[in-house]
Image: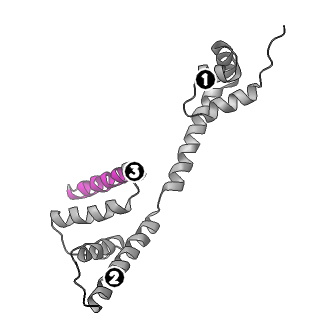
Amino acid sequence: MGRRRIDWTAAKISYVSDPTRSFGKIARQFGVSDTAVRKHANAEGWEPEAVEFDRRAEERALSAAALSRDEMTQRVLKLRDLTLERAIAQLEEGDEVKLADVPNIVKLSELLLGEATERIDPVQVKQILAIVLRLVPADRLAEFDRAVAGVLGATAELGSGS
């Protein structure tokens, strides 16, 4: 009985494109030994290609999920406009209106647009961040945290006279 003919190109594609890749997994999938897969992978440079594939996939995912600063600004401005419109409509209808969030949304929009605002106390900052956090998709919170840390670091450097 002859050796089994393996489509090594298909095996390589399976390995490179699978985020949970392993030689054993490919070996089971194609009915060969781990050693045979490892030899082909080493000879053909599968691992560097897999690393590059992962890097590009991560780039595409971040790019697709990322809201640009302009998009985020537009969302906040839309939120501000809708909040104000709703409050006005409720007032015109004689309904009771909860206006507590309106000043914070207006301040946030002013900050995003680069307009001067008066100093705000820490309670107001927490309120504004609570509103912003509702706008940040859950899968983007880590990136948001890094961005905030970067801004806070830059602010601390400016304050220290560096």
Mark 2 → mark 3, Cα distance in angstroms: 32 Å
Magenta highlight range: 144-159
Task: Give the residue pinned by disc 2.
Answer: 86
Residue 141 belongs to magenta span:
no
Q: How many marks?
A: 3
Q: Earlier in the sequence, mark 2 or mark 1?
A: 1
Looking at the image, which residue is at 19% across and 67% down?
A: 124
Q: Where is residue 70 in the image (x, y as percent from the top left)?
A: 45, 68
Q: Which of marks 1 and 3 is nearer the N terminus?
A: 1
Q: Where is residue 84 in the image (x, y as percent from the top left)?
A: 32, 82
In the image, residue 158 above or below residue 40: below
Mark 2 → mark 1, Cα distance in angstroms: 57 Å
Residue 57 appears left or right of 40:
left
Look at the numbered disc 1 and give the secondary structure of its residue: helix
**Would you say the magenta stretch is mainly helix, strand or loop?**
helix
- Crowding at mark 2 (Cα within 10 Å: few <14, some 14-19, many 20+): few
Task: Give the residue pinned by disc 1.
Answer: 25
2 vs 3, front mark: 2
Q: Position of residue 33 (x, y in %)?
A: 66, 13
Residue 45 seen by the camera: yes
